[in-house]
Amino acid sequence: MLDAHWDRLAASCAVPNPFYERWYLTPSFRHFDPGGEVRLATLVVGGNLVALMPMARKPRYYGLPFPHLTNWQHPNIFCGEPLVVAEHADAFARALLGWCDSNPQQALFLSLSGLPRDGLAFDAISTAAGRDGRSARMVQTIERAALHRGPTPQEHLRQALERKRRKELQRKRRRLEEAGTLVFSRQSDATDLTPWIDEFLTLEASSWKGEQGSALASAPATEALFRESLEGAARAGKLERLAFHLDGRPVAMLSSFLSGSQGFGFKTAYAADLAKLSPGMLLQVENLAILEHDDIVMSDSCAAPDHPMIGQIWPDRREIALLSVAIGGALRRAVGAGLIALEIYRTQRRQ
C-alpha cells in the first residue's frame, strides 16, 4: 500500500530527490540500516501521502557528543530534500517540528543536511521555526557544480572552458579515436543493464578507488546498492547511462538519475591507463546534452565542491545547505541554540 502512495508522491512532489524515492531508499535501508533504526517521517492529508523524509537519531555530531535528530543519509545519498507536495510544505514543516518537540528523547537539536537552497524544505522549515521563535540557522553551505537549461551543450562548454582547453579536448578525442574503434552509447532503458553494471564495477575497481578500497565493489553493501538502485531506476524510467567503449573495452562510464524536472549525476568511472587522454572528461562533454531532455531544466552533478574535473566543465552552481533547528521545550531549545551557534563559530574558524 505504501509503495503506490510513495511512487505517486515522487511523481507529484515540488522538488525532485531520487535518493528518497522508493527504488533508491528501499535498498538503502536494506544495506545501510539493517537494524531498522531509521524511521519515515510522513504527512498524510485526505488519505494521500503528501510528504516523506527518512529520519534517524544520532549520538554524535561531527565527532562531538551532541545527540540529535537528522534527515537520514549514507555516503551515497547526495540530496537531503524531503519529498513534499508544494501546497503542503508549510504543514509538513510544522508537523515535523512539532513531532521533534514531543519526541526528542536525548536529541538536543534537529540537523538537516543536504538541503538545496533552491528547494522548498529550507525556507519552509526556517519560516516555521521563526513563527515559533526558535533558532534555525544555516550552519554550513557548499556550492556544487550544476547545469541550468538555456545554453546549448556547445555554449555551456564555451562558457566553462577557454578556447585553448577546448582545442586540447578535441585533440584528445582524436587521439582516442585513433587508438581503435571508439563507440559512444547513451541508454535510458534496461537493455543489457546487468553486463553494463558488471563492466562499470570492474572499471571502477581498476582505478585508484580500487587501490584505496573506496570502489563500489570494495564492499558488498555498496555493490548491492549500486546494482539494485540502477535496476530500480531503469524500471521507473529514471536511469540514463553513458559510455565510451574502445575496441569493445569500456574506457569511461557514467550513470545518472532523471527525476521530474531535474537530473542527478550518480557514479562515473574511467580507465586509469588512458588518463592522459581524459576519457572521463570527454564523456562529461557528451553528458552536457542531458539538458536536451524536454523535461529537464537543471542537472545537479552531485560531485564534491572541489572535484577537479566536474567543476571545470559544469559552469553553473547549486547551493547545498546544512540547517540546524532548536527543538523541545524552552530549556532544550536554549541549549540547542547555543550548540548551533557554537557549530557556526567552529565552521567559520575552519574556513
Image (spheres, helix red, strand yellow):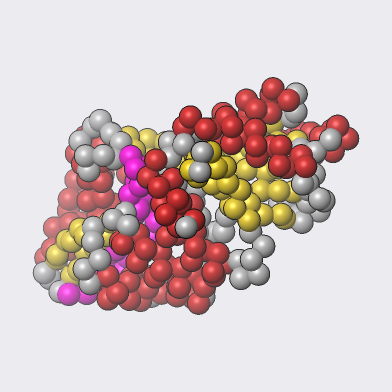
Residue 131 in sight from this viewpoint: yes
Of residue 285 and residue 2, the one placed in the foreground of this image is: 2
Judge whether 188 appears above or below 261 on screen: below
The majority secondary structure of the magenta stretch comes to strand
Of residue 172 and residue 305, the one placed in the foreground of this image is: 305
Q: Determine the image quadrant of residue 192.
A: bottom left
Is residue 277 a member of the stretch shown in magenta? Answer: no
Point out the stretch of residues depicted in magenta: 248-271
Judge whether 56 appears above or below 208 on screen: above
Expressed as whole percent of the image width and height from the top left, the position of residue 98 reads: 71, 37
**Horizontal arrangement in the rendering, residue 204 relative to residue 162 (left or right):** right
**Horizontal arrangement in the rendering, residue 260 relative to residue 38 (left or right):** left
Q: Determine the image quadrant of residue 317.
A: top left
Judge whether 22 appears above or below 193 on screen: above
- Image quadrant holding the C terminus, namely top right
Expressed as whole percent of the image width and height from the top left, the position of residue 222 reads: 49, 70
Residue shown at the point (69%, 28%) measured from the top left: 129
Of residue 348 and residue 81, the one placed in the foreground of this image is: 81
Expressed as whole percent of the image width and height from the top left, the position of residue 56 reads: 67, 54
Residue shown at the point (28%, 64%) measured from the top left: 252
Residue 114 in sight from this viewpoint: no
Residue shown at the point (57%, 42%) measured from the top left: 43
